[in-house]
Image (cartoon, rainbow, N blue to C red):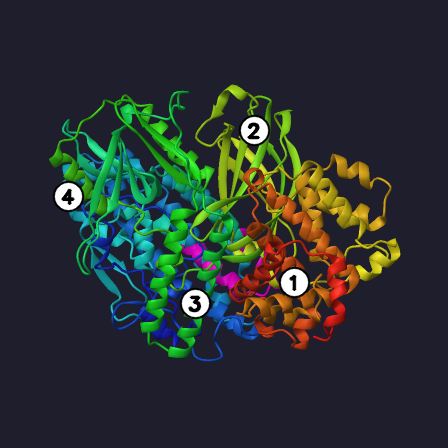
Amino acid sequence: MEPLSTRGLPRLSWIDTLYSNFNYNTDGYDGDAAEDHKSQDGSETMPFIDESPTMSPSLCARGPDGEAISPIPPEGLLPGGDIEKGLEMKKLVLSGFLASEEIYINQLEALLLPMRPLKATATTSQPVLTIQQVETIFYKIQDIFEIHKEFYDALLPHIQQWDEKVAVGHLFKKLASQLGVYKAFVDNYKTAVETAEKCSQANTQFQKISENLKVKGPKDSKDCTTNVTMEEFLAESLEMKRLRRRLLSQYKAGAGSFLGRGRITLLYKPIDRVTRSTLVLHDLLKHTPKDHPDFPLLQDALRISQNFLSSINEEIDPRRTAITTPKGEARQLVKDGFLVEMSEGSRKLRHVFLFTDLLLCAKMKKTSAGRQQQYECKWYIPLADLTFQLLDDSDVCPHIQVLPEHEIEEIKIKISVIKSDIQKEKKALKGQSRNVERLRKKMNEQESWLLLHSPTIPFRIHNKHGKSYLFLLSSDYERSEWRESIQKLQKKDLQTCQLSSVELQVLTSSCCKLRTVHNIPVTSNKDDEETSGLYGFLHVIVHSAKGFKESANLYCTLEVDSYGYFVSKAKTRVFRDTTEPQWNEEFEIELEGSQCLRILCYEKCYDKTKLNKDDNEIVDIIMGKGQVQLDPQTVQSKNWHVDVIEMNGIKVEFSMKFTSRDLSLKRTPSKKQSGVFGVKISIVTKRERSKVPYIVRQCIEEVEKRGIDEVGIYRISGVATDIQALKAVFDTNSKDILVMLSDMDINAIAGTLKLYFRELPEPLLTDRLYPAFMEGIALSDPAAKENCMMHLLRSLPDPNLITFLSLLEHLKRVADKEPINKMSLHNLGTVFGPTLLRPSESEVTKGHITLASDIWSHDVMAQVSVTWVQVLLYYLQHPPISFAELKRNTLYFSTDV
């Protein structure tokens, strides 16, 4: 076959520079690959596949110093412009991918060249390899070659004859639909590697063949032929060193390199091709208009590819060889991560390492700049001696100090402000990084503090022959993962072990090179080009679940990540005594830089004797758990995205839709003035002939009757469908309101009250007075602030004022129950402040609001929200305010503001 060529493909003058800088477009052997794909202890590795959408090869250009830089095409070609520019970028992405596809096909062909003579000699009297050995080593390579050759031949003319009508989505979808060949390849992978290793050691002729391959390059390259060994040929020059390191973060136990040591296994290359195709699909979707015929086809191809990579990841055993035990067995690292330990009454950040026979807890030693990091072992427990048993009645459960939620929220706001300052510095300084580094350090301190003080879920480790240890986690998902990993290892015939001081020192020293988690998960440790996640509201409908073998009482919880840790955000009802629960419940979840949604499915336990003293609640059994990446291109659409998470034989079906912060927070007046939602409060009270709207009175009454002791009342989301049902009956003034309220979940009623205030056409404290409230709360003199803030209340229309005072007294009564419901005045101020003060869209567009042009951005919202909370908190902390007293004092004050 003639060498393939991309000569004649359309290129701009700057694209050649991109090609020379991007490993993405040069698949040749990288001299650093030998080190990058070798663990520091010399062990062989099986790369882990990273299907993250953030790993885009379009970000991996290298500057003169070798550091990664973001490529900036000439002005007019930047992504995100008009359709014409977007299509031009799409053409460039395709051209680059086609160039790398050419090299990949040449390399596959080079691998097939020795296969043919090896097959021919297998039937002779002096075979180099047997037929079975040849077929095992080269399993499915021919099929993969033919698939990609057909794809290349079909794609090339489309790019050579490029215009805006060219469609290539069907080619990528067809390529993705043939991934079953790759699955067969992967299933055979370990056998192929072991066979090749044995043949290389036993047969010098085969080894010589593997060391003298010639790989053809493109015709327009300077060197058309490259001499490489077989291992070099298939050793992958991955598109990014950062991607290499992520790929190497998980390992296949026992797999050697193919015909050589110290380099990535040569048979891994086809799998990396799927990874690369997935990355390219992300880039193509960025530059393809949603109404283009390619868009749904590329989405389908991306979904198929991601599902394939996820299934491969699940089958990879994430273990790395550490050191040899005294018995001559390999001790391997199975899992590691940062956890918060309660030690001597205070929280300590630890790095925990789970090996095949023991659990080791370490802390990072302080080292001077430039010196290698070192760990200090705090304790270890042999897995044979480790238990999760509950505390006896005689044991004392230590009190876990939990910080007030408002302190957590204040730190989050500080972090958002610092992020905003960093972006401003970057734009202003144009490369001078002293202030940026100072701000990054400050943000790291705040995020580290947050990571240390946020977790509250206990995870207790017991040593049968010694003391117990307590970790605090932020997520039940994470606690389950650690417990399951330990229990899986404990199923083997483990013997207790006692490490000598030397053995412990060697093992602890090895942790630096064996760890898979290098940094605490904070924003300041991420690369600039990594996605910051989604900010806004994720609407999730949990439809149903299948796959349960026995009837049970079942429910689901939803978790999302935020500020480096996961938080539980919503919970379905318990569906009782069933194998196929049908929840069909909708939730609105606020996202703060979130990238992942987790779903956990539980069996509810009603047995009071199974009380877990660690968290003082009944222990419910996790039946399954799973997670899905929140890909902006998938969820940021007007339509619901239906998906299924498979977990431990269980399938949970759900739908999700993302609403950006600007859309979700805008006030939209109702077109129908006959209802109550979206209608001015003065109109509603006049129609009802009441001082406070009926909906406010009834919701407050119901919450105080049966929800005032509810943990997280007003903070925990109610079911969206229930809230919409209540909204409908209040809008139609149905006679069923009271019956419906008495039967409805209390969180839905609380959510309805919040929704009413949120959907008012203008805030309860009015658009007219908004600037004055913002200025009044900023006054330093207490007396001046008191006079101003009381004067502003007097200036409110009577329906607004009376309703506000009624709500104020209700929230104070809720806060009185803080020891039970965990809702302090600060928490309630955080929930209701933005709802009662956020200005209407008309005021923002008129320019009456400070920072009007940026009012809906995340960083500005975070700063403004602080003031909104402070205003409400001022009145919540104030002694009781009487309407009559306020009106008496009206004579002494002007009402002009």
| Residue 727 drawn above or below residue 223 | above
Q: Amino acid at mark 1?
A: Leu
Q: Amino acid at mark 4?
A: Gln
Magenta residue span = 276-300
| Residue 284 drawn above or below residue 580 | below
Nearest to N terminus: mark 1 or mark 4:
4
* Rendered-image quadrant of the C terminus: bottom right
Tell which of 40 and 219 is nearer to you: 40
Nearest to N terminus: mark 2 or mark 4:
4
Q: Select label 3 or label 1 by which is in front.
A: 1
Label annotation for residue 95: 3
Nearest to N terminus: mark 2 or mark 1:
2
* Rendered-image quadrant of the N terminus: bottom left
The secondary element bearing badge 3 is classed as helix
- Residue designated by label 4: 205
- Residue designated by label 1: 837
Q: Is residue 363 left or right of residue 400?
A: left
Spatial CA distance of label 2 from label 4 is 53 Å
- Residue designated by label 2: 547
Residue 508 in the image, given as x and y percentages of width and height: 19, 41
Q: Is residue 294 visible?
A: no
The secondary element bearing badge 2 is classed as loop
Residue 542 in the image, given as x and y percentages of width and height: 62, 40
Nearest to N terminus: mark 3 or mark 4:
3
Q: Is residue 861 visible?
A: yes
Spatial CA distance of label 3 from label 1 is 52 Å
Q: Residue at x 88, y 54 (%)?
A: 689
